[in-house]
Amino acid sequence: MDIKIRAAKIEDMSAVLELIYELAIFEKEPEAVEVTVSDLERDGFGVSPLFKCFVAEIDNDIKGIALVYNRYSTWKGPIIHLEDLIVNKAYRGTGVGTALLDEVIKYGYSKGAKRINWEVIDWNEPAIAFYESKGANVLRDWDVVQLDEAGIKNYIDKL
C-alpha cells in the first residue's frame, strides 16, 4: 500500500470534514461538530490561515488528516499544536497514522518548534499506546480546561 502525505488543498476540505465527523462519532459526540466546509476553506486558505492540514492519500483517496497550528509557550517559545490526527477506521494500523505523525514532526522541526502538543481522550488506549510508542509523553496529571462559546458569552455578560 502506497501512502502519500501532502499538504491539504482547499478542494480537500469536504473529505477533511468527513473525517472530522468520523472522529466525532468515534468520540461519541457527533452533534458537537459545528465547523463547515466553508469554515475550513476560509480558515485554512484565507489571507491569514489559522491552520495547516496534511492529508494521507491511498489510491488518490484521502484516508487520514493531521491538522496543526502555531502556538507560543511562555516557557519554551514557538510550539506547534496538533489539533487532530484522524485516520479512517478501515485504515488504522496500516501506517497511515505514523506517516501523518512523521509529517507533523518534520513540519514542527522545520518551523523551529520547541515542542509539539496535542491531547488524547483518556479512554482511547490504542491512541495512547501509539503516541507513547513514538516517544510522546502523555501527561496524565494535567487537565484540559475549556470555555465554550456559551461560557465565553456568559463571562462577557458578567463583566
Image (cartoon, helix red, strand yellow):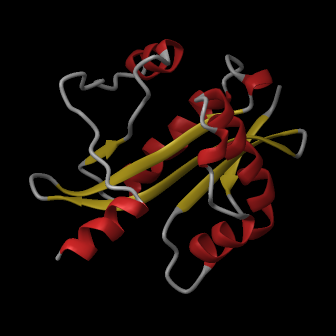
Q: Considering only vertical position in the picture, is 6 above or below 36?
A: above
Kindly identify the residue that appears in the image at 27 percent across and 45 percent down.
145
**Left or right: 17 as drawn, with respect to 141:** right
Q: Considering only vertical position in the picture, is 89 above or below 99?
A: above
**Left or right: 141 as drawn, with respect to 33:** left
Kindly identify the residue that appears in the image at 24 percent across and 22 percent down.
140
Kindly identify the residue that appears in the image at 79 percent across and 52 percent down.
15
Q: Residue furthest right?
A: 59
Q: Which residue lies furthest to the front in this view?
A: 158
Residue 44 screen position, x and y as percent: 59, 70
Residue 108 screen position, x and y as percent: 39, 51
- State the count of labels: 0
Q: In which quarter of the image is the C terminus?
A: bottom left
**Left or right: 71 as drawn, with respect to 61:** left
Q: Residue furthest left?
A: 75
Residue 65 screen position, x and y as percent: 65, 44
Q: Which of 55 and 102 is in front in this view?
A: 55
Q: Considering only vertical position in the picture, is 48 above or below 81?
A: below
* Quadrant of res 3: top right
Q: In which quarter of the image is the N terminus?
A: top right
Q: Considering only vertical position in the picture, is 93 above or below 85?
A: above
Residue 28 screen position, x and y as percent: 61, 29
* Quadrant of res 41: bottom right
Q: Nearer the viewer, residue 35 or 79?
A: 35
Q: Residue furthest bottom?
A: 47
**Left or right: 65 as drawn, with respect to 122:** right
Kindly identify the residue that appears in the image at 52 percent across and 36 percent down.
101
Q: Which of 144 and 55 is in front in this view?
A: 144
